[in-house]
Image (cartoon, rainbow, N blue to C red):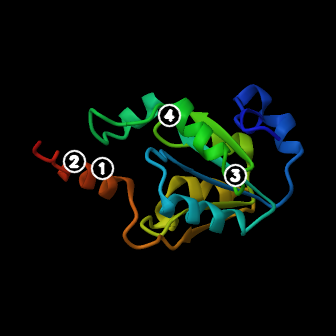
Amino acid sequence: MSIDDKIVGLDGLPERLSRLARPIVFTNGVFDLMHRGHVEYLADARALGGALVVGLNSDSSVRLLEKGDDRPINGERDRAIMLAALESVSMVCLFAERTPLALLDHVRPDIYVKGGDYDVDRLPEAALVTSWGGRAQAIALREGYSTTRLVEHIRALKPSAS
């Protein structure tokens, strides 16, 4: 399957979901500057099931999250391609809302995962997934890896004097 084939809109979702191996695992996020923490998190998520669907915040959705005027750094198409290129990712689907609740209702995954920095039991996404018999769980994050930390590091770099 090509990278572009892994990026699916809502209109193509039902047919594509029917071809995925079960159990289906779902996670979501911005995934702005891809780093090792993202890659390992997604591999861990995929290991929980037969397929991994990633809900990706659209550019307009990222702005709703108030991550800063300069975010996202990479546009939604670039971020979707980076995710789709990963072996662990079965499908990428953009969503424009603040949360992926509507997308989750379409996908109806067996397992919903978020990073260990979230209290999964308090997320409305977890309540939705458990309403149809699915489960929600946190995956431990790799210490020292975050987009915010990477952005801060880049901003702190100063050009050398010539």
Q: Which residue is mark 3?
A: 89
Are the two marked residues, 2 and 1, in contact with CB atoms closer than 8 angstroms?
A: yes
Of tags 3 and 1, the one toward the viewer is 1
Q: Which residue is mark 2?
A: 155
Of tags 3 and 2, the one toward the viewer is 2
Are the two marked residues, 1 and 4, in contact with CB atoms closer than 8 angstroms?
A: no
Foreground pick, 5 / 115 = 5
Mark 4 / mark 3, whichever is N-terminal: 3
Are the two marked residues, 3 and 2, in contact with CB atoms closer than 8 angstroms?
A: no
- Would you call the spot at circle 4 few (<14 residues within 10 Å), some (14-19), or many (20 or more)? some
Q: Secondary structure at mark 4?
A: loop
Q: Which residue is pictured at 39% across the width and 59% down the height?
A: 146
- Would you call the spot at circle 2 few (<14 residues within 10 Å), some (14-19), or many (20 or more)? few
The x, y position of residue 25, in whole percent, is 71, 58
Q: Which residue is mark 4?
A: 97
Q: Is residue 57 above or below residue 140?
A: above
Q: CA gap, disc 4 to disc 3?
A: 22 Å
Looking at the rendered structure, the kind of residue marked 2 is: Arg
Looking at the rendered structure, the kind of residue marked 1 is: Val
Q: Which residue is pictured at 47% across the width and 31% down the height?
A: 75
Looking at the rendered structure, the kind of residue marked 3 is: Val
